[in-house]
Image (tube, rainbow, N blue to C red):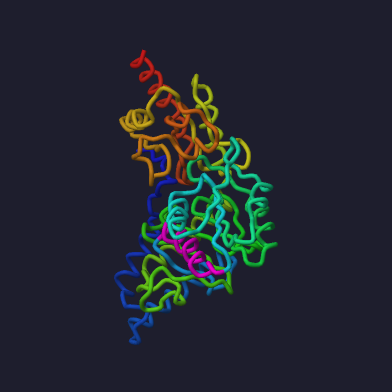
Amino acid sequence: MIYFDNSATTKPDPNVLDSFIKVTQDFYGNPSSMHDLGKNAETLLRKAREQIANLLSVSNDEIIFTSGGTEGNNLAIKGIALQHQARGKHIITTQVEHPSVLLACEALEELGFQVTYLPVDNYGRISIEELENSITNETILVSVMYVNNEIGTIQPIEEIAAITNKYPKLFFHVDAVQAYGKIPINLNIDGIDFSTLSGHKIHGLKGTGLLYIKNGTILFPLLHGGGQEMKVRSGTENVAGIVALAKAMRIQLDHLNEDQKSLVEMKSELLRAIEKIDGTVVNTPTENAAPHIINFSIPRLKPEVVIHALEEHGIYISTKSACASKSPDKSSVLVACQKNDEVSRSGLRISLAYSNTLEEIKYFNQKLALVVNQLRKGIR
């Protein structure tokens, strides 16, 4: 099997699973309990928080554990909106965000908030000038993803942060789910107030993640209860999942420092082969793009047909975001990038992991050319 759908989810690393199983079996106490089982679990939780804070170069009390990217994005966006609506009810985001951001913003519009959805250029990047021109006295939040989950575009986060930092009542949220471990990220940039990470995108476990919250920032909690996670996210902590998250983050960061070149080489090999196929359109930009995502279209071929044809050869790729992949509609990201209807409907996504190999890439390239040729003969 060749798995090229790592932006949807990743296979858990064996070391991550070992950590999870050990903690589940041996440290199953509630970290809020006063007895030794609880204290032992609380110690592990504290150590995992310290390790993760160290990996991100932030303070321990700036880490809030969540169930993943969707919860983290909702907590940041709705939490700021509800807490600070007296200061203004205007939010700025982009047309190419993950559904957990777009739909959170749409929900807030129903509560009377105004949202500006910034357009992007053909490469999926926003205009810094347009962003700054969109800021008003009512703006309280800007939310922009680091790496686009469909086409891999890297947004100019440092430039955005430099702008948002000029407005004292304006918060800046960065969805870094597709960025961590694939490109260097710096959450200590002045202007970044929140950032979201997800465990299952980095060979951790589903249902694990975190939200970085800059010290001094106050959110309205979405979950009320026992006051865990510094009263921001109540609920008994998933200690085993959090320890596994810390392990996954460490492993992924080591890969970034040691093996990023391999991702670049595999992506280049894929692009060369894809561009040789007549009629294909590469949607991923050549510059300012992450090394693990390639999006391309084969007009006149239904993406689901291509996906299932490749699956018969033991190859797994995807279309758009996994959250919307079962919808036959056009990709909203490709539409926002001004792609025509044929291109927007036929987008395919390859997303790599460090565990993939050049041998897999070469096999895929052969089978893709074969599948496209066979499918095109069938529609003549």
> Residue 357 lies in magenta, yes or no?
no
Q: Is residue 69 left or right of residue 171?
A: left
Residue furthest out toward the front: 112
Please report the residue visible at 35 percent of the width from the left and 74 percent of the height from the top.
236
| Percent position of residue 330, x then y | 42, 34
Please report the residue visible at 53 percent of the width from the left and 74 percent of the height from the top.
61
Camera-side residue of 67 and 255 = 67
Q: Is residue 176 left or right of residue 371?
A: right
> Residue 84 lies in magenta, yes or no?
yes
Residue furthest out toward the top: 380
Camera-side residue of 360 and 141 = 141
Q: Is residue 154 above or below residue 250?
A: above
| Percent position of residue 139, x then y | 60, 60
Q: Quadrant of the C terminus?
A: top left
| Percent position of residue 344, x then y | 46, 32
Can you tell which quarter of the image residue 158 is in?
bottom right
Residue 202 visible to an observer of this rendering: no
Q: Is residue 296 above or below residue 73?
A: above
Residue 157 visible to an observer of this rendering: yes
User: Magenta region: which residues?
Assistant: 68-86
| Percent position of residue 74, x then y | 44, 60
Q: Is residue 215 left or right of residue 321?
A: right
Dominant secondary-structure state across the stretch colored magenta: helix
Q: Is residue 259 left or right of residue 299?
A: right
